[in-house]
Amino acid sequence: MDYFEETKKVSGQHPKPVGLVLEYGTAGFRAKAEQLDHVMYRMGLLAVLRSKKTACTIGVMVTASHNPEEDNGVKLVDPHGEMLASDWETYATHLANAEEQNLKSVLTNIVEKESVNLQEVARIFLGRDTRPSSQKLSQAVVDGVCDLGGAFQDYGLLSTPQLHYMVCCWNTMEQYGIATVEGYYQKLASAFIALTNQIPSHPEEMRQLYVDGANGIGALKLKEMEPYLEKKLKLNLCNNGTTGKLNYLCGADFVKVHQKPPQGLDMKANERCCSFDGDGDRIVYYYFDQSGCFHLLDGDKIATLMTTFLKELLAKADLDLQIAVVQTAYANGSSTRYIEDIMKVPVHCVNTGVKFLHHKAQEFDIGVYFEANGHGTVLFSKAAESKIRQMAQDESQKGEKSSAAKVLEHTIDLINQTVGDAISDLLTIEAILFIKGLTIQQWDLIYTDLPNRQLKVKVSDRHVIVTEDAGRRAVSPAGLQENIDTLLKKYRLSRAFVRPSGTEDVVRVYAEADTQISADTLAYEVSLVVYNMAGGVGEQPKLLH
């Protein structure tokens, strides 16, 4: 019997647009929603083969995160809630781009190369965000799963981190948690309540938080979770999806890139505010000071807050565990210097992309990783977690050591270790601020960010840009890095790099310097160099200030 017989019959109902070429990157596939029907069907097929290969449940998430509402995308989730293995990213790309007549041979090649046991049972967990196109595209995934005889559980509307959590829970026989939405809420809320109960009370304003939900799934899920928090935190939710457009003039990406508050949030001075992105895996904080100046606390500030908290607890518990911070080239130079020079915690820089940070963070007892855009989490090795839990439950331990171990244990339970999770990170940040008695202004003063600017340059082919040193230096085109180095000499405390986008033909430019005007000018000048040397298209870059 031909195992792929059914795919030959059904794949024609999900035709591939002529000439369309897509690449599976860190964020999976992203494109205009109308281009993705065939990709969704084929990722359903691939998920079944991946499930048979690993003998585990695999997740499929239909989302395009912070992209505009008219876009969509898909990513696969591996057995422990992690990103899809790199080799299988390549298979995903080949499968998505295969012409109809070659589909069977591509599938057969995957089975043969990976020695997939086709008799193994396959199980898929499916989730989707709130985009108008997501339900129809999810059905295309189901078609692919069913055509290869896979079983599936459709969770419907989920944040991306919730799907990662569900997959991990199921594959660990629910040692990590219960694989239901209620189980997710109960686990996080119980840990948050246990942590905040450590401190008797704080002023009312410490409990007030204004949340921009980006008109996405994160807003919906945060609203569902609120009753579980037992009024320990007062959430004022805007951009909740009832009227606004997903990610339009709101959300974490908008706030980070434009360095201003989202539309729909009426901020007053010193009010603590935060923004999610469209699928609920990024978070950034911000506030206006009394003079009306906008202050952004991004992933670097979050990483520093969490690392400070964890390091203090380890010292109080007298636990000899190695803690490290993992960043990308986008991390603000001030954060790196503060963590290394003041906190005496090692910092490691890796290529941009969550999977690179996650893998590096796994090398330490406790690995804190955040991209500057607000996507990140904390990983605890099994050995470190075991030590912490043993001490927390050891009745012979008394005083500060015992208390610190218990706080660490609750923190482990509050953090979603599978992937960056805006809801989990929000609760962790709020618990830390509550326990330490910090206002957002005091948190912000831990160190001062260097002014920075991000720009992007449209090019005919982004692949002409090749980088090394975790994306911090350009290898080609020849002479590009030398030109950047010359520009850097003009400005104090300056740093700049360029890197090709993973999903579109643009080159991203990052620059920082001692003043905002210098950072803006440096970013503009580097953008001009990229435009002239890397095949820029359309209008030349413009100076922003």
Image (cartoon, helix red, strand yellow):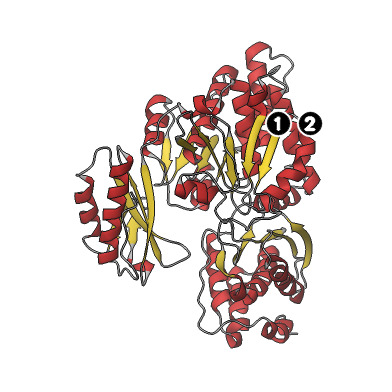
The percent position of residue 402, horizontal first and vertical second, equals 67, 17
Q: What crowding class fits label 1: few (fewer than 14 Cα within 10 Å), some (14-19), or many (20 or more)?
A: some
Q: Secondary structure at mark 2?
A: loop
Q: Which mark is residue 277?
A: none
Which amino acid is tagged 1?
Leu
Q: How many marks?
A: 2
In the picture, measured across the screen, residue 361 lies left or right of residue 188, that is left
Q: Quadrant of the N terminus?
A: bottom right
Q: Residue at x 60, y 67 (%)?
A: 70
What is the x, y in percent for residue 216? 66, 54
Question: Residue beneath label 1, please?
Answer: 233
For residue 353, say whether it is visible: yes
> Observer-nearest residue: 388 or 243?
243
**Does 435 appear above or below 276?**
above
Q: Residues within 10 Å of mark 2 (few under 14, many from 20)?
A: few
For residue 398, what is the image quadrant?
top right
Query: Callout 2, which amino acid?
Result: Glu
User: Residue 6: x, y in percent?
Assistant: 74, 83
**Residue at image location 72% in from the left, 49% down from the top:** 220
Q: Which residue is mark 2?
A: 230
Q: Nearer the viewer, residue 175 or 13?
A: 13
Q: Is residue 481 above or below residue 306?
A: below
Q: Pinpoint residue 192: horizontal percent, then vertical percent.
A: 71, 31
- Residue 237's quadrant in the figure? top right
Q: Nearer the viewer, residue 545 or 447?
A: 545
